Image (cartoon, helix red, strand yellow):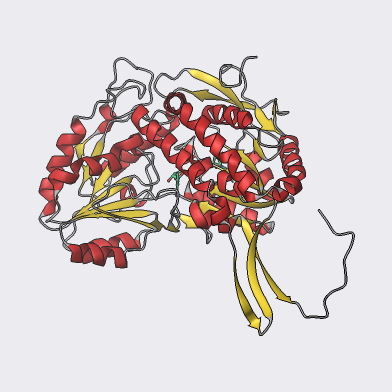
Amino acid sequence: MVSPSQSQLKTLRNYVGGQWVDAETKETLPVHNPATDEVLAQVPLSNKADVDAAVETAAKAFPSWRATPPQERARYFFKLRQLLEAHQDELARLITTEMGKTLDDARGEVLRGIENVETACGIPSLMMGYGLEDGAARGIDEEVIFQPLGVFAAITPFNFPFMISFWFWPYAVAAGNTFIVKPSEQDPIVQQRVFELIDQVGFPPGVINLVNGGKETVNTLLDHPRIKGISFVGSSQTAAYVYARASASGKRVQASGGAKNAIVIMPDANLDSYLSTIMNSCFGASGQRCLANSLILPVAGAHETARQRLVEAASRLRIGNGLQPETELGPVVSAAARDRIFTAITNGIEEGAQAALDGRTVSVPDYPKGYFVGPTILDAVTPQMHVYKEEIFGPVVGMTPVGSLNEAIELINANEYGNAASIFTSSGYAAREFRYRVETGNVGINVGVAAPMAYFPFSGAKRSFFGALHPQSRDAIRFYTESKVVITRWTEGDRSPVTGVGR
Ligand code: NAD
């Protein structure tokens, strides 16, 4: 049998109730290789009937999955972890082929996804409640238990087509819920392969489902009365919309949004040691990371040196197809993204920014049809400019020199986004002040990409996160369960036998 990931030129399929099924919709979109413009597959834009089928099978699977003891549920994840590890390189290649990031970067993404599966293997400990003898009164005990709720769904973005679904479903499913994943329609192929591996694990039918699609698919999930909650990652505009619409139908929602992350470079920063981490945070994945740093705030004397070192290093980056080992900067995800980024650079220069390095003139002769944007460094960017305020999501960095650490922190806190911020300094005092005052969910101290490990929450604040409990770790377990408090009293008189009770 030809597997869905091998039959790439065909229309991708949904995975519902433990079976590969053709979506009922006839509407599809092409999936492109961003380095070559080649069409790799067609993705179906699943309709209401497609979503209903997935929700129905997930709802049906819930009672017996919930009744499966946590330690037994964990064993499925041990098996999944092994399968994912055995296919790491293949999965990384699929990511690079449809998304564009370099193979090294894609390998990192796969590892980060697997770490979430490893963390979910600890579900018996993660899901434990707590109790107190005589906690309510003498002879009356009180405890809290955490119970799964039913069907959840995740809607994920293009920039981590493998990893982001793993921020969610392993925790939800390990906790006893059933699940639907809706990947980005821009790069859905790697999830076909992931679900082939999930199929090999042998989860009971309906426990974990894949539904491909776009906006209408999302709307059906958001409104569906049998879905208990939604996990979302994408731009802030979509996150705000998803948060409002799904909560209006009574669901719990966690929605991670966009970002405009800044790096503060203090005059005492050890640039020799940290230049490569700064470069990676600005240009890794061609700036298409929610933790990418797209603003640099050099403090006082740090400006000239930082500009010179960054421009030198960025001009040396080797641009090309991410599948080639020497490539350091791959294409951006789509022709539309490339054109939008070029326009943002042009507008920034028209607003008065100085192009210290201009990526619009990039040429990659071996891949003339690729969606490439060269590394771009705009200097003298002011907080009033669009290029300062808006998320560009490309290899474009704005430099805004400031007079003091205080000014840098105030600028970061004035930003509508609050995903991440980093400081580079040799001063413990400056670092401590930064960590204490800065209003972002993730903070890096001499670290360029402050990406939380799976056993920490992937935080975010202000318009970078809508909700209360974040992806990953204990936050995820709490999101996917409800607390139930049980207060118990037994007295000597409670002796009558009870019959006819059982699951
Ligand atoms: P996007 O918002 O365009 O799409 C994300 C998902 O939402 C996709 O599955 C898409 O099908 C769906 N969608 C898009 N528009 C919709 C609409 N109008 N109605 C209903 N559904 C819709 O985001 P993207 O371009 O795929 O991803 C990039 C964005 O994601 C960036 O802003 C980036 O910062 C953000 N991001 C954030 C984090 C984080 O942790 N905060 C992590 C990764 C990416």
Which residue occupies the foreground of this view, 256 or 47? 256
Q: Is there any visible trace of residue 184 in the rendered image?
A: no
Which residue occupies the foreground of this view, 221 or 60? 60
| Residue 382 occupies quadrant | bottom left
Left or right: where 329 falls relative to 42: left
| Residue at 54% from the left image edge and 45% from the top image edge | 121
343 is higher (above) or lower (below) than 368: below
| Residue at 49% from the left image edge and 43% from the top image edge | 118
Q: Is there any visible trace of residue 375 in the rendered image?
A: yes
Left or right: where 234 falls relative to 324: right
| Residue 18 occupies quadrant | top right
Q: Position of residue 418 (x, y in %)?
A: 39, 57
Most extreme residue toward the bottom, as rendered?
Answer: 138
Q: Position of residue 5 (x, y in %)?
A: 56, 21
396 is higher (above) or lower (below) than 20: below
| Residue 275 occupies quadrant | top left
Q: Position of residue 287 (x, y in %)?
A: 34, 39
Most extreme residue toward the right, as rendered?
Answer: 500
| Residue at 37% from the left image edge and 43% from the top image edge | 392
Which quarter of the rendering shows the N terminus?
top right
Which residue occupies the foreground of this view, 140 or 41? 140
